[in-house]
């Protein structure tokens, strides 16, 4: 495996999943045992699929994952087929060597207390070493919809209209109104952040996140200040980046 190179990596669309998996494995190989934050969403599916293939080979590449934490969840029935729990059961759990994912309890009667429990659990293991995140079309990271600032912590949120409409394809007409999410403070405190984005529908928000002002109106823009950010973008998602944003291919 090649050494890890932070920065913005742009790859052909067909190589997106493998490039994302290799970037993660490279981060893992360069660190000690790691606490990782895991995303859901369509972006993450080719990533987990490629990770599954890599993990089926020799060397137990996920052996360095000490703990895994979901970065968010919908407030919905815990066994709902569109809940993030179901996503992890389908896409993460079959990966060889993958530890169980710590998850929000979406049926908790006291949701703020549940958010606090989850935040405390993460803090007790020392926070995230590697935060893997997708990006919403409105610039959200996890369910930190705009406006969200860098001091936001793990909490219950009202989902933005864009986040709810993006979830309609899996939930159908009754998309949850609330979510539970790690805050930007927990995500940005990670030693490494790995941002994944693919597809032309993300081009405008990727441009805003990397080339626009750092502002609560685009929560992902705070990644411009992160000391160890790796982004894996496919060519369509990177297509609106100006030349002033340095990428490698
Ligand atoms: C979802 C999740 C995020 C995810 C993002 C992008 O709703 N809350 O964690 O990264 O939105 O989703 P997708 O990859 O499907 O575009």
Image: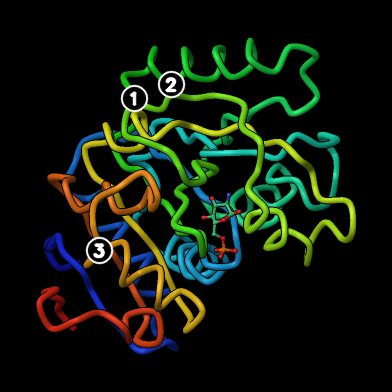
Quote the CA–CA distance across marks 2 and 1.
5 Å
Q: Earlier in the sequence, mark 1 or mark 3?
A: 1
| Residue 184, picture quadrant | top left
Which of these two is toward me, 214 or 188? 214
Q: Earlier in the sequence, mark 2 or mark 1?
A: 2
- In this rendering, the answer to whether 21 lies above or below 75 is below
Q: Residue at x 39, y 64 (%)?
A: 196
Name the quadrant of the N terminus: bottom left
Residue 226, above or below 2: above
Quarter containing ligand 1?
bottom right
Which element carries disc 2, helix, strand or loop?
Answer: helix
Residue at x-position 37% and y-position 42%: 63
Q: Which residue corresponds to mark 1? A: 127
The percent position of residue 116, horizontal first and vertical second, equals: 54, 13
Which secondary structure, mark 1?
A: loop
Which numbered marker is on residue 122?
A: 2
- Proximity of marks 1 and 3: CB atoms separated by less than 8 Å: no
Q: Residue at x 87, y 61 (%)?
A: 172
245 relative position to 139: left or right: left
Residue where numbered disc 3 is placed = 212
Image location of residue 99, percent across then percent down: 52, 37
Task: Please tell me the numbered disc located at residue 44.
Answer: none
Instruction: For marks 2 and 3, give the CA distance.
Output: 31 Å
**Whether residue 233 is situated above or below residue 87 in the rendered picture:** below
Query: Given contact means CB atoms under 8 Å apart, are the residues at marks 2 and 1 in contact?
Result: yes
Residue under the image location 22 percent in, 50 percent down: 29
């Amino acid at each position: 495996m090649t050494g890890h190179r932070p920065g913005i990596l742009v790859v052909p669309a067909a190589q997106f999943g493998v490039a994302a998996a290799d970037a993660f494995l490279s981060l893992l190989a360069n660190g000690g045992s790691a606490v990782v934050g895991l995303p859901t969403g369509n972006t993450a599916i080719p990533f987990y699929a490629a990770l599954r293939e890599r993990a089926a080979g020799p060397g137990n590449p996920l052996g360095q994952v000490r703990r895994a934490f979901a970065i968010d969840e919908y407030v919905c029935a815990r066994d709902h087929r569109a809940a993030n729990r179901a996503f992890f059961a389908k896409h993460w759990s079959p990966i060889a060597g993958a530890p169980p994912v710590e998850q929000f309890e979406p049926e908790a009667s006291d949701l703020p207390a549940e958010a606090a429990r989850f935040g405390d659990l993460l803090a007790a293991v020392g926070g995230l070493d590697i935060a893997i995140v997708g990006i919403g079309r409105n610039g959200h990271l996890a369910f930190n919809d705009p406006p969200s600032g860098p001091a936001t912590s793990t909490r219950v949120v009202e989902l933005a209209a864009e986040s709810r409409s993006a979830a309609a394809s899996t939930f159908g007409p009754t998309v949850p109104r609330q979510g539970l999410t790690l805050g930007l403070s927990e995500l940005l405190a990670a030693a490494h952040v790995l941002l994944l984005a693919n597809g032309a529908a993300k081009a405008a928000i990727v441009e805003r996140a990397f080339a626009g002002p750092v502002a609560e109106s685009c929560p992902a823009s705070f990644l411009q200040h992160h000391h160890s950010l790796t982004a894996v973008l496919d060519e369509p998602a990177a297509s609106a980046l100006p030349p002033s944003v340095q990428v490698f291919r």
